[in-house]
Every structure is written in C-alpha cells, then in structure tokens.
Amino acid sequence: MSVAMKSLIIKIGFISVWTGILIFSGSCTKDLLDQEHTTEVNASNFWKTEADATYALMGAYSAVRPCFDRDYYFDGQGEYVRTRSISGGDAYQGASWNPTGYAGSFDNMYRYLYGGVNRANYVIENGQKALAVATPSSVEGLERVIGEARLLRGIVYFRLITMWGDVPYISKVVLDNSEVSTLARTPIAQVKDSIMADFTYAFEKLPVKASAIGRASKPSALAFRGKLQLYWASWNRFGWPELAGFVPDAAAATAAYTAAAADFKSVISDYGLALFRGGEPGNIDALGKADILPNYYYLFTSAANADSEILMGFTHGGTGTGQGEAMLLDFANRSHESSQLRVMPRYEIADRYQLITTGDFANKLIPLNPGTTPSARTTLNSAVNPASYANRDYRMKASIMWDFEVSIGFSGLKSTGWVPYVYQIWTQPIVINGVTYTTYGSDNTTNNSGYVFRKFVRNTPGLARNDGDYTYPIMRLADVYLMYAEATNATIGPQADAINLLNKIRRRGNLPALKADKYANSIVFFNAIEQERIIELVGEGQRSFDLRRWRAIERVWGAPGSAGVWRIDTYGVNKQRFFQNTIEREYQQDYIFRIPPGERDRNPNLTQNTPWL
C-alpha cells in the first residue's frame, strides 16, 4: 500500500444502513446528507486524473477493512477457538462468539458492510464518469481503479450473502433515505450473479501483480471468484433450508464446483505464486524455547507483508497512524503490553496436530491437574507434561503455547525478555532449567483451556498492542490450495494434483506426505482436506463459514435435543457446555443470521429470515 494510503486516517460515523452508511467527519451543525466527503475529494470538483480516483479508492479500502481485519473472532463460533466478549472492533462489536446463539447479534456488521458498499459505489460511479471523458492514456488506470472498487464491493456482498442470504442489492451511491427505504431483499442468486460480474470485471482490469502492498491483483480477483463459486456449490449440494425460497440444485452444484476448480487452478498455475518461504518448514527450537520458530509463525508477522502467499490483505500502519491492527491486544495477555487475551485455543485443538514421525494423529492427550496429581508433569501423554508435545506438526509450536513455552513480553513498547506461559499460575516466579522467570500474565478468568496462541503474537518491540503493522490476509494461497482440492474432490474424487497440494501444505508443518489410505476415496480425502483447513487456518475466521456451508454443526456438536458437548481444559475440568438439549430452531438460527430489527423498522419491505420470525 502507498504511503498516502497508510497516512489516510479516517473517522467513521454511521447514520443508518439506508442512508448508505455515509462516512463523514467534522461539524454536525449542517445536514449530514448535504456534506461533502472529507476523506476523498468530491468528484465534481476534483476527479480529473487517475491520481484523484486512486485517492478516493484509498477511502474505499479504509471503509471495507474494519469489516474483515478481525475475522479471527468468527473462529469462536467453531469448536477449536474461544472468543470472549469484545470491546471495540467496530463491525465486530456487540456480536456473540459462542458456538450457539451467535447469529442474532450482528447488527453492527450488517451496517458496516453496507457502508463499504456505499464507499465502493462512490468510487465506481464517479470513476465511470471520469472514464467517459478520460484521455486515452488515462483509461487503463481508471479501469484499474474501478476494478479494485468492484472487487471490494464484491467481497462485501459475498460476506453479506454468506451470513444473511437474500440481501438488498444497491449499485449506486445513496444520498437520502428515500432512495432505499422501500427496497426489498434481492434473491441470493441474483446477488451472486452481480458479485460474479464484479469479480470478473476486476479480474479483467487488474494487473497481474498488485501495484502496492494491500492492493488487489488478477490472482486475488480470480481467487475470490473461485471461492464464491465454491460456496454456491456447497449451498446447492448441502442445502440451505433456513433461506426461504432457496432450492438446492445438484446440477448447479456440479457446475459451480467445476468453475471454482478452474479459477483456483489458474491462480495456482498461471502467476508464479508460492507459499511463504517456499513452503519450507524452517527450523524449530527445543521444547520450552523460542529463539528459533518455524516459518509458519513468521507468516503471521510483518515479515510476510509483501509475500505473494497473501493474495489479498488489509494493511495497517502501526503505532501513531490510527490504522493499526489489534492482534497483540486480542491474542496475547497482560505480559504483552497489558493485552486482553480475547481469542484463545480450546483444549481440543491440540489433539489435531499430527506427528512428524508418522504423519498421523498421536494418542490423545490426558488432562491432569498437577495440584492433585503430583506426577502430572511427567506422565506420558499428560497435557501438562511439556514432553507430550514433542515431534508434532511444526505449526503447533508456531500457533499455540502450552505449559512452559515462552514468548517475548512487552511493556511500554519495549521487550521485557522471555516470559513462560503456565496455566493458572499468574505472574508468579518460576524456575525453568535453573533460570527464574515471571510467568505469562494469564489467569483463569481470561483463559479456561490451558493454552494460548502464539500465532499473531508478534515477537518484536516498538508497536503498541492495538497498533500493529501486519497486513491481515483475507485470502491466502494455502487456502486456495485447499479450496481447489475440495472443489475437485466433490466432483471427480481425489486427484494427483490436489493430493500434491495438500502435501505442500503439510510440508510446512514438516509432516510426511499423506498415506494412500487418506485419499482412497472422496470421503476420506475430504476428511484430510478438513484436517488441513483446521490446522492451517486456525484463528483466521474460516471455521464458522465452513461448518455452515457444509451443514456440519450437528456433526460437530450433536443433534437437537442431545446432551451437548463439554469443552474442557488441560486439567480435565469441564469449562463450557454447548448445545445441551438445544431445540432445532436454535440450530436453524446458527445457520442464518438475523436481519437487524432496526433496519426492518426503517424499511417495511425488508423481510426477516424464517428462523428469526
């Protein structure tokens, strides 16, 4: 991203969705609907060059970013990550992140997404006006700007339909409530076609390589077009009964899977892209040390900001810019700039990390309380015995921390040295190999699993807890590999190239290649794909969307009326129980989100999704 984009500080305010979520700053003494945009130049006054259009485009990027750059919260709706209640986070504020009951509290997200639509429409509409009178030398640049804006609009509408199904489709700048106050919801198939048109235009007009970090390119547009088709295929294959009027179509599913695979194949083969650091695992330190961490860890630090694996990401400016990311705040705790530990691994994720010796699962960990079982820290396979974590997928050490693992603490933007994590021992001195440390500041009020994330917790000082400079990915090449494998497997079963792609992802964890029994048929190969999606994408907000599009909530949590599932900790204590005696209606409410009641109050033609009536 350009310096100008990084320095563009935007103050965002909201009137309502149906005023287009006008984005403004400054005095409120005049009618807000009559104010000119203050974060880009008014088209009638200034849009005369590509540079003018690009300046406005930066405003669109900044408006869309808050809808996606904390997507890791969504992982709290799955079974492997806990997300506590949050404060801040803009579009994510006020939502529920528990596995059940979450789809009725996303009013802020709905409004912010339509704010992104309106900002993208502003660029598209005025870009087209500028294009109509442009000199020949300016045409290509203006089309590129419009292409990026259309990609942003497509991404936002894609998110809207994945959550709410049918949604009103708005393709122009909204300046007054009367323009949209009677709009009905547009059928999802029609919205999908409009998104496809946006992604296709973007693919045709964007450069092969983005002009700056955080800008879109042909591969990113193609990847999103493939993902849209994959989701369309999933809904048509598995059904979406909670969406009124949607009728699944097996033929449409097959066609969409095939089209998705073609797009993903092009991304993989046609642009010279590669996994971060060649997909090599890198080196790994001994248990309890972290001077040397696997390459996968650095993929989630600013070291990867310019890497081609991040097909599309939202940039952040760091301390003092007003555009920082909050990964340290959300993933770390008190020993790291007094952070909040809002996102943490659940106990159950640890058993998903396979052995580098066999390439398969280890014996399940045994939860033991060292306070009541003196041998807990030396018992074979005990969850609190550090030796139990030897010889695991390198992504385990890069992603999570267990008892006696260390990370670098921070205070006042300066390093405080190595800090060990020990569950339920909060800021106490502890001796490890003859060295005395103060333990990781994570008490049982904030952590209830026995693990914390290392993924996204940066190991460099100088940046405040919510002022990081990481380019948060919303599309990664590894995800494209996995989506390609899923799409081809759904129609023609396990293919050699798809198996090879999974093995490339496993290679970064230093795992051996898949054994033949893992791709003997489409069922077992799907299980292998899901396994890699769980491990490779943990903490990135993908699991919730996978569970819903696969109709897999009952598979994970049990059928309606069942006893439910406990989430436990490394001590074996039952911590949280989900889906106990849950009625079918609540499951339905987990598959589709509630249209915000306030928007329905303003618009009598805005119908509600059936489970929420």
Image: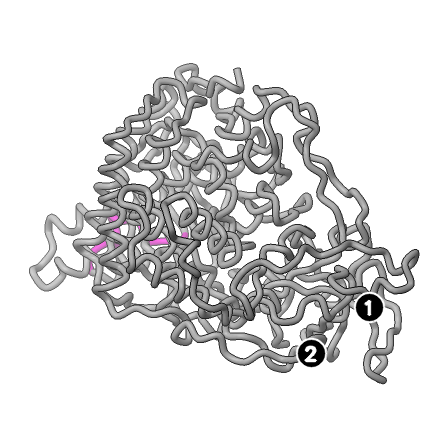
Q: Position of residue 446 (x, y in %)?
A: 76, 52
Q: Position of residue 509 (x, y in %)?
A: 51, 68
Name, please, the residue furthest toward the left.
Answer: 136
How packed is label 1: few (under 14 Cα within 10 Å), some, or many (20 or more)? Answer: some
Note whether residue 7 is visible: no
Q: Amino acid at mark 1?
A: Thr
Looking at the rendered image, the disc whose residue lies closer to the viewer, 2 or 1, is 1
Q: Quadrant of the N terminus?
A: bottom left
Read off the magenta span: 39-49
Is residue 243 a member of the stretch shown in magenta? no
Q: Is residue 10 left or right of residue 574?
A: left
Q: Position of residue 207 (x, y in %)?
A: 21, 63
Residue drawn at x 43%, y 40% as measured from the top left = 113
Q: Is residue 53 left or right of residue 83?
A: left
Q: Would you say the residues marked 2 and 1 are in contact, meaning their CB atoms lie under 8 Å apart?
A: no
Residue drawn at x 80%, y 60% as measured from the top left = 423
Q: Amino acid at mark 2?
A: Lys
Residue 289 shows which numbered tag?
2
The image quadrant of residue 430 is bottom right
Note whether residue 343 is visible: yes
SS class, disc 1: loop
Instruction: Give me the C-alpha separation between circle 2 and circle 1.
Output: 18 Å
Residue ID for mark 1: 378
Residue drawn at x 82%, y 78% as measured from the top left = 432
How packed is label 2: few (under 14 Cα within 10 Å), some, or many (20 or more)? Answer: some
Q: Does 393 sit above or below residue 156?
A: below
The answer to which of 516 and 331 lies nearer the viewer is 516
